[in-house]
Amino acid sequence: MRVLLIAGGWSDEREVSLSGAKGIHSALLELGHEVDMLDPAQDFGNLMSRASQADFAFINLHGSPGEDGLIQAILNRTSCPYQGSGPESSFLSLNKAATKTIFDHNSILTPKWELICSIDGCKGIQNLKPPVFIKPNSGGSSLGMTFAKTEQEMQYGIEKVFSMGDSALVEEYTRGIEVTCGILGDEPLPLILITPPEKAQFFDYNSKYAIDGAEEICPAPIEEKLTKQIQEITLKAHKLLGLSGYSRADFIISETVPYILEVNTLPGMTPTSLVPRAAKTAGYSFNMLIEKLIELGKNR
């Protein structure tokens, strides 16, 4: 089968995307597929023509133009199927405020939040006091995130996000442990407990990708009842957002109460990334996971 592997792009997460694409490329070759690589930042204008010549597209993009649904919308204008979710659900999920609106409306617990925009008349932070997390509303990999413990740090965090050209999502700090749960098809994967290194204030970019980053334990050593509850919430969120194929939801467990933080529609896909790690615990090798995602994409 001819697979168009789409990676790179123009977001701040470009290097993460290219790094993950190396493992996917190797896996596709080992599975007997013919691989054609396309970087939207370098060959966007030929996307439709090259997709029309492929049997399948495997998207490994983070941020825009993959997680925002743009690539999927273009692929929908060709005969080329792809793995993962479609344009609308991808767009909704990348926007943190949009997903939290859906969570709140459907009684899924998420930390209190406010959306702050850099426009005249925006009132700024009204209801939250430090400590808070301040994040780009449509970014990933914890890039641009600030853990603000003072009013001054809050203002710095907002200005930092605005300098990136984004609106700011301010989220109440919830003390607890962090876990993540993946979905493959319609089945929740084993939970992963994430413990950032002592020097890190939270699960930041360095904790995610550095050699000496966070400790990740799978399956997470938490009680079965709570594990099932988080898996059920993850599947509910997956369906409410209209997602397909796979996704990953991040949680904070405060005492015994899980709060969902956000949902990722194109999770990292290096062999040691979170979803591949959980899939391995569930019995899928990395190559098997890639093949499963292709199968799900073709059958969608």
Image (cartoon, grey):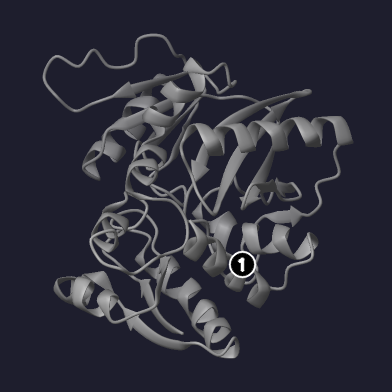
Q: Quadrant of residue 288?
A: bottom right
Farthest residue, direction left: 120
User: Is residue 238 depicted above or below 130 in this figure?
Assistant: below
Residue pictured at 64% horizontal, 49% vertical: 182
Residue 27, image x, y percentages: 58, 82
Write down the quadrant of residue 287 in the picture: bottom right
At horizontal 63% and vertical 38% (from top left) the residue drawn is: 235
Residue that appears at 40% across and 34% down:
96
Residue 271 vertical placement versus 72 (above, below): below
Check disc 1 and report its element: helix, strand or loop.
helix
Residue 111 coordinates in the image, percent (x, y): 55, 22
Q: Residue drawn at (37%, 37%), measured in percent from left and top?
A: 92
Say left or right for 246 vs 65: right
Q: Amino acid at mark 1?
A: Lys
Whether residue 153 is visible to the viewer of this picture, yes or no, is: no
Query: Which residue occupies the foreground of this view, 194 or 291?
Result: 291
Residue lying furthest top: 127
Look at the picture and state if 294 lies above or below 3.
above
Write down the quadrant of residue 252 in the picture: top right
Q: Which residue is mark 1?
A: 292
Mark 1 surroundings within 10 Å by alpha-carbon count, few (fewer than 14), some (14 through 19), many (20 or more): some
Task: Give the x, y percent position of residue 26.
Answer: 54, 86
- Can residue 294 be seen here? The reply is yes
Q: Position of residue 72 (x, y in %)?
A: 32, 57
**Viewer-proximal residue among 296 and 69:** 296
